[in-house]
Amino acid sequence: MKGFLQGLTSKPEKAIPVASGDALRLRILDEFDKAGVGWIWATDAAGKLIYLADQATEKLGRTTGDLMDRPFDEIFELDEINESDNNGRSLKFQLKARNKIRDQIVRFALDNPRENIRQTWWSLSGHPVRDDEGEFIGYRGAAHDVTREYERKLIDSKLADYDSLTSLANRHHMERQIDARIAALKTSNRSFALMMMDLDKFKRVNDTLGHQAGDALLIEVAERLRSIVGDRGHIARLGGDEFQVLIPDEDDRGKLGELADKIIQILSQPYPLEDSKRAIIGASVGIAVAPFDGEERENIIRSADLALYAAKNGGRGQFRFYAADLKNEEQERENLLDDLRIALEADQLRLEYQPVVSIKSGAVVCLEALMRWEHPERGEVSPSSFIPVAEESDLINNLGEWALRTACETAAEWPNSVRIAVNVSAVQFANPGLPAVVANALAHSGLAPDRLELELTESIFVGDSIETEQMFANLKKLGVRLALDDFGTGYSSLSYLRSAPFDKIKVDKSFVESCTQKDKNSAKIIAAIVGLSSALNMETTVEGVEAFDQLEVVKSKGAKLVQGFIYSRPLLREEVLERIKQGDFVIEPDGPDKYRPDRRTVFRRIGVIHEDYYYNAVMRNLSRNGAGIEGIVGVDIGTEVVLDLGEGQLAVSKVIHTQETGFGVEFETQLTSDGSGGLCTRHRVPPYTIAAAGLPQKPGTAGPTDGKRNESKPKFLEIAPSSITA
């Protein structure tokens, strides 16, 4: 002990006899410890605690044996606020870096979760110590208890930095966290991800169930977010129904996509409220990753915002990663809405009709009306883009009325054995005037009511309100049929079937896509839904069947009606009439033997890097596992190349087959979903590394000097992309 204490203290200026000097030091240190104003602590070179005053261990409610030889960073941890002041550097990081520690607030963490009400806070100082040979031998420092003062600071901080409703961090606090991560990014290249999210259909909850129900829902949303994110990141409520999640030290877009998807799925589960009411909402998420999508706070937030708008514009209930080609989606939505109003007036919209076919006979029993829009400048605009825009305005009611009238007029020309199905959005369903619109469409066309099916989704069940039940009753009085679309994608579908008067259930195509995979339960789910609807005397239509292996599975599970490309793509009105004129409206299945979900046809300019040369090429098809490349010839099987997909996406690949104008590659690491039906690399190369390599801003457009092409010689022959037929 005497030798150890000598190491803790500096040598006296005057010579003192050894015995009296040691005794004096011991007495002073003992008195200092007993006074309770502070304590001495020390660690060894491995970072384990080797000394702490007895009074200090008693203060912590532990014995010396409990604490000695434990890692110091296991006993104490930085408070979240203090950690943000240290550029996101934890106590463990600082100790490993052998930095000086000055007046840092730490929490006694050993077997003491953050959630506990009673906590102990110390102010810690210390410095690394080396022996005469310069070898690091541990830390020596002092500490004192600041629990009372720090708890007051936490209360003040909570009022200033936390949302009063949900107790999540607020915008001000999150900005500090982002700034700390940006500082860490610049000093130690530590990346981070920022998720922006808002709640879909939350406004309807406030409008229909009241603000008190809305507040209760927001509190529950915050709890669900805490349970999902846990200690992986920081969560903030920015105001209203806007939330933000910061994930430190993460740039793997595969993991981020999985987390975003889990957030969306969990937040979309029904919320029990007072008076036996329930609310059903959704969530959209935009994701940006620093430094790839921004190196300053304003830039990274803007990138995440643009990704969020893209997710909402893509149909909501999905996530999107930021990409450089994303426009200002908010302005884009306004422009799209203006163009959509013009389209409705200028007759730019049309309906196409996809058959629902009996597996047994091949007879068409129904056709679903699908809205299409060919913009004079934009070209074909996807319904997943313009329908959500219309739903945010009154225009959806006008579109819905036009679709109902047009579909009924068209179906009146068909045989009485063929029905027409029309989609009705949740916004239309909430409009008290919907029954009158349906009645007018039937009267105007002369169509028999039982030949009209209204397809509804689970989103109509905002609160199981009396208004919902009354709407069902009013529609059934008209004699129309009701179908529950996308069944199985919600979380309480069975409860809807107890009272809602549905005539048909439509099995969502997501189950069909994976029904042939042995490691999935999709085929069993299809069988269960078919059995359930049969027991309830309802029809079942299975959507999205494209290949014969899928058809065999759904047929074996008892399905009788199928809708999908294996029978027909959506048809124009004239095509339907022509088929009817030919006699019995019967369609034989025609499609591939096996469904291939991954491969998709693309035409995308990319770069191919082999050794030190950058080639321009075109990618013709893409899957998670590989791609087909055209524009380079003379490449041998087994050759290793790197594909430049743009924005720092470099995919290490191996050539697995060749052809006359190109070759096919297999990726070393599978691609991951970008949230919008596309694929992207899990990791990216920082922009400054890309710039240093001289790669072109747009892949596949390298000039004579881009990618240092002028400094190396090609081994393979590059065919100009313009000579490849698009």
Image (cartoon, rainbow, N blue to C red):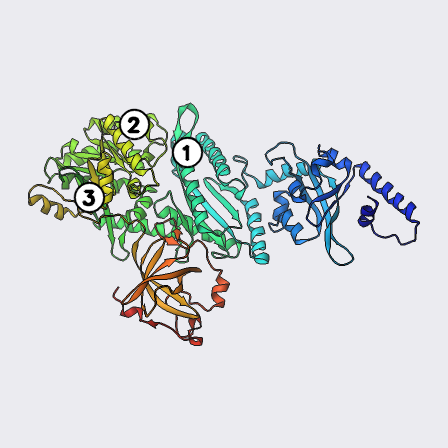
Q: Give 316 or 615, whichever is nearer the viewer.
A: 615
The residue beneath circle 3 is 354
SS type, badge 1: helix
| Residue 541 on image: x %, y % | 23, 36
Q: Kindly check if marks 3 and 2 are in contact, taking CB atoms under 8 A apart as contact.
A: no
At horizontal 43% and vertical 49% (from top left) the residue drawn is 254
Does residue 60 show up?
Answer: yes
| Residue 49 on image: x %, y % | 71, 43
The residue beneath circle 2 is 497
Could you classify mark 3 by the number of other residues whose Cα lies within 10 Å: few (under 14), some (14-19), or many (20 or more)? Answer: many
Q: Is residue 627 left or right of residue 5?
A: left
| Residue 641 on image: x %, y % | 40, 64
Q: Give 120 or 717, whichever is nearer the viewer.
A: 717
Which quadrant of the rendered structure holds the N terminus?
Answer: top right
Q: Give 128 or 389, whichever is nearer the viewer.
A: 128
The residue beneath circle 1 is 206
Comes first in the chain, label 1 or label 3: 1
Q: Given the image, on which type of amino acid does mark 2 rest?
A: Leu
SS type, badge 2: helix
Label number found at residue 374: none
- Mark 1 and mark 3: span between their CA atoms? 37 Å
